[in-house]
Image (tube, rainbow, N blue to C red):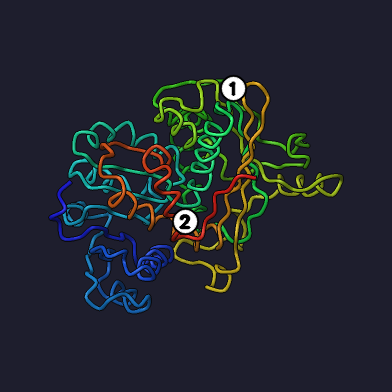
Amino acid sequence: MSESRDFDIVIYGATGFTGKLVAEAMTAKNGHGLRWALAGRSADKLAAVRNDVGAPADTALLVADATDPQSLRSMVSSTRCVISTVGPYQLYGSDLVAACAELGTDYVDLSGEPLWMHDMIARYHTAAQASGARIVHSCGFDSLPFDLGVFFLQESARQKLGATCPRVRGRVRAMNGEFSGGTAASMGATIEAISARPELFGVLVDPFCLANGFKGPEQPADNAPYEDEVLGQWVAPFIMATINTKNIHRSNALLGHAYGTDFQYDEMMATGAGEQGKAVAELVAATNPLSGDDVPAPGEGPSRESREAGNYDVLFIGTTADGREIRAAVTGDMDPGYGSTSKMIAESAVCLIQDCPDLPGGIYTSAPAMGHKLIRRLVEHAGLTFELE
């Protein structure tokens, strides 16, 4: 794509809670020396965000609205890459993806909406290949720590054990912070979509629905608590597994099945050993963290103090075909839904345009698109760690 466009990165949805945090993350890194702009529906609100985050006074402001396709095309044609924080994406994101795929503009988002992603792949992957647009979904807590965590584990297994792992367990050992209101809204929109079109339920429950038609082996059950002998603890269902597992199977497919055609993966929340661990697992399984009065509405979120007090720790346990084991951990230094997510998507956009000049167009997940390049950026700039245990 031509570097003669006005901007390198445009943050679309910058007046929303998460979009403002992305602008703050870019400002903190002096924009990585790139030309970047803020976009949204209101010029006045964009100006207020620019001032609030301390961005340079000459940071450009672009008025663009999901209900006005021409304004989206104008924005898309002005930049090399769009960061989209405007969700639920199935309600507000399709025209933007279409414009990026047509005009050869790179794109990253925070989507945790597999039905919508399935639709975008079917409709625009070929167009993106033709135009050179690199479109990467799920560049926040859905699903970077998980997708890149499995990728890091498998690459480490290849180097240290001479083989990849057909069985990987993802175990969330700690997660302190709030899910975003956008995540809750996206889940609500997905439920409404299935109510209107019940045939989509089969897509939603298929772990390989994003894997380009590949159908792999039956996957481990992840819908009830049990005592995990490999971990030595009780585990409970992890609510984000529904999207993370699908992205990881897509990554495996796009990587030429580097993890194997017999690859099995599940994600669970670790709750401790013994009777206490069992009781916590049962409580987790009976609770929906995306419902109730405590879930922020879209556009709302926790205080800076709460974001900075948050963290997460995910363990990945890989087992080779001959029974050898390797373990890797991914941690983040802020709450997953807001503080860490905003830094992750900002670094994803920078990585895509600065570090991946030879990546062909198409619709990707993070591991096959950016892999070790993005891991390095997340460690250096976003407060994540990737380490073997």
Mark closer to the chain start, 2 or 1? 2
Q: As shown in the figure, which amino acid type bears the numbered disc 2?
A: Gly
Q: What's the distance in space between the residues labelled 2 and 1, CA to CA? A: 31 Å
Quick check: 131 left or right of 318? left
Residue that badge 2 annotates: 182
Of 149 and 93, nearer the camera is 149
Which residue is found at the position 58% from the left and 60% from the top?
178
Quarter of image, res 366: top left
Q: Position of residue 356 (x, y in %)?
A: 30, 45
| Above-or-below relation of 316 to 173 | above
- Residue count near mark 1 (Cα–Cα under 10 Å), binned few <14, some 14–19, many ≥20: few
| Residue 82 drawn above or below residue 306 | above
- Closest to the camera, between mark 2 and mark 1, is 1
Outermost residue, left direction? 4
Label 1: element kind: loop
Q: Amino acid at mark 1?
A: Glu
Residue 31: give its label: none
At 23% across and 58% down in the image, what residue appears? Answer: 8
Q: Kindly indicate whether the residue at mark 1 contacts the one at mark 2 (C-beta within 8 angstroms).
A: no
Q: Which mark is residue 218?
A: 1
| Percent coordinates x, y for residue 263 in the rendering | 55, 25
| Position of residue 126 measured from the top left corner of the image (x, y, whole percent) | 25, 31
Please identify the quadrant where the C terminus is shown.
top right
Identity of the residue drawn at 38% across and 58% down: 346
